[in-house]
DNA sequence: TCGCTTGTTGATGG
DNA sequence: GCCATCAACAAGCG
């Protein structure tokens, strides 16, 4: 379920299993390679030692003592560690075999996302060049200020990786529900209090889930665990509504997140 | 068979 | 130029 909190968990997982280890061999599904061939990737990584990985938004940057391996997980990507038995799966698109045993696998059922190779910081920056600041790094007041400079729909902004990197469809619904903002509210119709609520909600949701994953949702009220047809709002028990915003299925509470003012709206039949 | 799915990009049209 | 929408990518599921 790769949004920022999931990729943050992958970063820690990669650090635990691969940092400090030397690559013995590489097996790839060439259809997932985006800027490199199978043989070039293999030659570039064999004998290299992985350093501490970094994450920006939904991207994982796996540095070695040479080039960096960049992973994007699409909608179904994950990391798998195997200490002994091969038990490889047909969805394993990249397998890193390590000296001394064990292998780390990038598994991805659908082939969205992909694998990149970058030589140096400049190439990494080129590949990640369109991303905005990472959602985990942003103080709430700064998010609130950033929101003041945009005009489109609230949910579209939250999911725009060039605006803030790391928030996907589920997190955006959670953040808007917590801030009590309708997903289609125009940002230039938000008052100061609403922008502050939204900024704080981004901060709260992203930090809680990045720190402890789904376990964070065991306490307090969360939309994500009940986000489906027929469910009730965890706050007010009103049946959740479903719509499409920013091209994605969107759940919200019609009572907690009222539509608000649509600028420029004209009633039919008005003179 | 159709519609839907945690993501991203590019085309299109208002 | 801005912004919303949709198809495409791809594989699985109900």
Image (spheres, coloured by chain):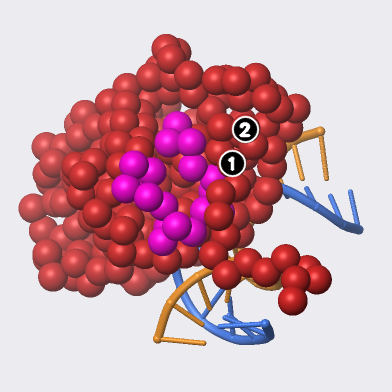
Chain colours: A red, B blue, C orange
In the figure, A229 relative to A127: above or below?
Answer: above
Per the image, the residue denoted by label 1 is A258
- Residue at the disc numbered 2: A255
Residue A177 horizontal/vertical position (percent): 50, 35
Chain for mark 1? Answer: A
Residue at position x 19%, y 67% in the image: A125
Name the quadrant containing residue A66.
bottom left
Mark 1 burial class by Cα count in 10 Å: few <14, some 14-19, many 20+? some
Instruction: Verify whether residue A134 appears in magenta.
Output: no
* Proximity of marks 2 and 1: CB atoms separated by less than 8 Å: yes
Residue depicted at 64% across the width and 48% down the height? A249
Q: Nearer the viewer, residue A166 or A61?
A: A166
Asked if residue A77 can be seen in this view, the reply is: no
Residue C7 location (% of width, % of height): 70, 72
Chain under numbered label 2: A
Query: Residue A243, how many percent across, how many down?
Result: 68, 48
Is the residue B10 above or below the residue B8 in the image?
below
The front one of A92 and A132 is A132
Residue A116, how many percent across, how many down?
A: 32, 63
Secondary structure beneath dot 2 equals: loop
Residue at the extreme front of the image, as rendered: A271
The magenta stretch is A178-195
For the residue pair B6 and A206, the one nearer the viewer reads as A206
Q: SS at mark 1?
A: loop
Q: How many labels were placed on the picture?
A: 2
């Amino acid at each position: 379920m790769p949004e920022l909190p999931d990729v943050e968990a992958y970063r820690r997982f990669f650090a635990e299993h691969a940092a400090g280890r030397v690559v013995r061999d590489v097996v790839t599904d060439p259809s997932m390679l985006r800027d490199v061939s199978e043989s070039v990737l293999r030659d570039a990584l064999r004998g290299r030692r992985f350093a501490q990985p970094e994450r920006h938004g939904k991207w994982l940057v796996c540095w070695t003592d040479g080039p960096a391996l960049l992973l994007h997980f699409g909608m179904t990507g994950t990391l798998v560690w195997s200490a002994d038995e091969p038990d490889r799966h047909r969805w394993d698109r990249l397998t890193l075999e390590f000296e001394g045993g064990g292998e780390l696998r990038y598994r991805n059922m659908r082939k969205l996302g992909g694998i990149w190779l970058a030589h140096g910081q400049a190439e990494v920056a080129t590949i990640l060049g369109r991303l905005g600041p990472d959602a985990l790094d942003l103080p709430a007041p700064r998010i609130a200020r950033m929101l003041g400079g945009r005009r489109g729909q609230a949910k579209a902004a939250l999911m725009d990786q060039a605006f803030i990197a790391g928030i996907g469809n589920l997190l955006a619904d959670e953040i808007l529900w917590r801030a009590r903002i309708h997903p289609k509210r125009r940002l230039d119709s938000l008052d100061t209090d609403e922008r502050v609520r939204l900024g704080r909600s981004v901060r709260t949701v992203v930090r809680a889930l990045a720190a402890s994953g789904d376990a964070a949702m065991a306490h307090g009220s969360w939309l994500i665990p009940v986000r489906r047809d027929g469910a009730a709002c965890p706050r007010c028990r009103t049946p959740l509504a479903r719509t499409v915003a920013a091209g994605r299925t969107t759940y919200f509470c019609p009572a907690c997140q009222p539509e608000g003012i649509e600028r420029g709206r004209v009633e039919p039949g008005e003179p």
